[in-house]
Image (cartoon, rainbow, N blue to C red):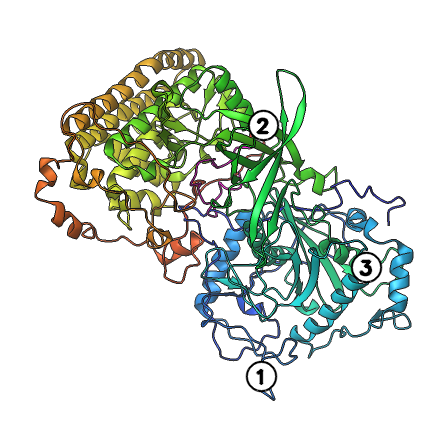
Amino acid sequence: MPTTSPNHDDPSPLGAPPVDLPSTPIMNRARDPVPAYADDDSDDHSDDDDNRFSVEAPTTPKTACGTDSAEIETPDTVSCPPITNTAEDSQRTFTNSQTGTGTPHSKNARKPATSHAADSENTIARKLMAIELGIEGSTKVAQVSKEFSQSLYYNKATPDQISHFLRRSSLFSLTKGRWSKIPKSSATLKEADLYEHIFDVVEEIVKYFKPEGVPNSVTRKVCASHNVKLSHANGSTSTLPDICVKATGPSFEAPERPGGDDGLGYSNIATVFDAKLQKRDPGAKALVSQIAIYCMQILIHQPNRNFVRALVISEKFVRLVHVDRDGTYVTPKFDIHDKTEDGGAYTFVRWVLGLCSFDEKELGLDTSIQWTTDDAGKKSEGTIVVNEHSEETGTTRLVTYDLNMNEPPLVRHSIRGRGTTIWNAIHPETGEAVIIKDSWRAGTRVAEGEYIREANRNGVKGVPQMLAFEDDREQTIDYRPQDFQHSTFLNRKKSRLVVEKSGSSIWYFRTRLQLLRAILAAIRAHRNLLEAGILHRDISMQNIVLGTTTEVESENQDGFLIDLDMAIRVGRPQDDVNLKDERTGLVLYHSIFLLCEIVSEMGMPALVRPPQDYMDDLESFFLVYCHIIHVFTSPGVWMPSAPRLLIQWLEDTDRDRMGRLKKMYVYEEPTSTAGIPPWWGKHCRALLVDFAGIIREMVKEKTSIYAVHLSPEERAEAQEKLVKNTTSHYDRVEQVFEKAIHGVEEEGFCGEEYQAYPLPGTHAIEGCDHFPLTNVLTVLPPTHIGPPSGGNTQGYKRWSEENEAESLRSKRNRYDPSPLSAALNVANGTTNEDDSDGDEDEKGEEEEEERESGDEIDDDYSMDGNYGAISDDEMD
């Protein structure tokens, strides 16, 4: 028990950040990474309602209650929460064995049996969540000390106040020294027997200690939810926490699909409590893997969350689970019946008060973002405050932006990592649309705002104009002991960036000309950044966006290169670049050198693994173009299944094989264009061949340096010679694009380009196994396509399409879908019952974070961000 009370305003004892299942080792669309489970109505011998999702593995000795070790060993068993599909399927109810009716607190709950398929899927889900949280394999779950645990929310109630409450409570027996209604452990005790009594205790604590002066619009209500489905963000799956605390206030709103009589959803709950039988305690790793699924949904549905905390309560012990952008930790177990002042009963009461607090900051919410709600409880208006610093005057001021409620925020579906949230807002002085980007970077990394400021100062065209930047808003160490250490801990720092709003991803191109011009503009921006001493290192479909037009023609920009989160300064010493830097970005766009072992023509392995350089980024530009030209049959119409070429790059989880497949394609002379839909025409095909030829030569040049036995002096000389070719490399790439652009201009628009752009709905990505963005664009911004500079401007079709307009429509489905395997679907975090692939996150499949460089996956501030699949990447 601390001798002094911690400062109530200090965030250290308050909270932890939020969570959502992340990116998988391949590509994921913006959906839930937790697999869907089919419930079976047959009887199960298990009393534990979540045990049917457990996968037993060899266990290790359990740690004694109250241990203060920084990391703890736990059995390699995970008990995932029930994930259900539609309202008709997999209904989890607790049925009274005598009456057959469902009751909120039935003590005779029938539990469906676990199928082998569910076990298998749950094993994958467990592994993915463990990777997301950084606790996979032999990595232990961090456990904070008893002293720190007791300091959490210490000021919520004094010892005298808690003592007075226990004396007055009808639920606590002073003579027996225990919560009288919570049953004792026994061989016949079932988990369902705990629900009602834990509910009663929590409800009484919240009501008794409710502070005075709380506005009527701010409420907390304890709700029994063990038979209430809370829908996930993907709309097709749901989970059932045992107890939820429903909340109203500036950060909460009524859910789209309310569950139960209380209208519950992850958008209007403050926290969750989960009941567990002591005899079935699976250990910290399993508990965290389950609770994190709830926490992830809270983070997605409450985009201004910094952290989430929850309690796991048995008939004897309570334990707090903390989740934020730096991972997770647990507290030791505390005996909830111990009525001494430094005992578990006092700590239990304070934790309940903290997790049900009427103060949103204590709940882990960023109170600089607030909303008002309408009569239906839906958010109707909102604001976000930025602490803007003026370099000219050296002063700061608080500026309040109105949120654009017609464009909801883009939220990264992940836990560990940058946790980017993109807010669409209106500048209070100019009335112009702006993008406000919140993100959590590793503490050792340079903030993105610093790179953009430097680029703007140097007049780099093609990089969005920064309007304001606020750094170090929060740090994850603030939610932990100041001496906290763990193998995955990076002390992430939250920053807020305001930039002028740019266009949407090139995925939404409307003409071939618009697409080529946008990619060329982004390549030129990349070149200018490099000349300014900045290497981007995160080229993807997400980060190349279409240009904007203004009334002043000289200010028009064909395209932008965004998201400098992963950038580094040129000249960074090689030994300062962790060799895991290759895990930056989406794996589909990773260069050959970042994927596979470098070998010479004679098969000699490389003695030195080069860090990522501008040539890797140029290759990523090529791979982006290769992706888009192979899957689009016309603007706005893409093939749901990627052609075999891309599937090979996506399905193989072996990075080395994936790199070799790309190398085989690039090294092929001439580069094959057989899989490109005929709509693109000869000039776009020729561009792919020419671009591939440049990449081929660069790969060979690098191989000649790093895959041969050279002395340090010889290698330095060769590297210097290669660097001298930088100008030539960029010049040649720009020339082949200019050549293609000129050819397309001469051809003129084809029919599809001249027609209205077919805006796809969310259904368009449900069967798409290669969708590279975070969300589907639902409002297309006005963009001036601009007529070709010469040739046909009347919208005539090229010869290749003159007789194929109708046949193309029938041919669009001629490409045999190459569905990824079921295992891949699960690995990608697919939870959609229609068996579509999981959302592809720009993070790709490998976002294993490095402690030293703190490199992370990509997030951006475009209109359509990228989703995080569970991958080694999203962990930053």
Q: Is residue 271 in view?
A: no
Q: Position of residue 843 (x, y in %)?
A: 45, 40
**Distance of label 3 from label 1 (alpha carbons):** 35 Å
Task: State the residue position of label 3.
Answer: 209
* Quadrant of the rendered image containing residue 342: bottom right
Circle 1 — which element?
loop
Q: Is residue 360 magenta?
A: no
- For image coordinates 17% across by 23% down, the residue present is 790
Q: Position of residue 540 (x, y in %)?
A: 39, 34
Circle 3 — which element?
loop
The one of 807 and 369 positioned closer to us in this rendering: 369
Three-letter code, disc 3: Phe
Q: Position of residue 496 (x, y in %)?
A: 58, 33
Write down the region rendered in magenta.
Answer: 854-876
Circle 2 — which element?
strand
- For image coordinates 61% across by 60% down, the residue present is 59
Q: Is residue 53 left or right of residue 476?
A: left
Task: State the residue position of label 2.
Answer: 469
Q: Position of residue 752 (x, y in %)?
A: 20, 41
Q: Is residue 871 magenta?
A: yes
Mark toward the start of the polypeptide (2 vs 1): 1
Task: State the residue position of label 1.
Answer: 101
**Distance of label 2 from label 3 (alpha carbons):** 40 Å
Q: Which numbered disc, 3 or 1, marks the residue closer to the eye? A: 3
* Quadrant of the rendered image containing residue 99: bottom right
> Does 208 sit above or below residue 69?
below
- For image coordinates 54% across by 77% down, the residue present is 44
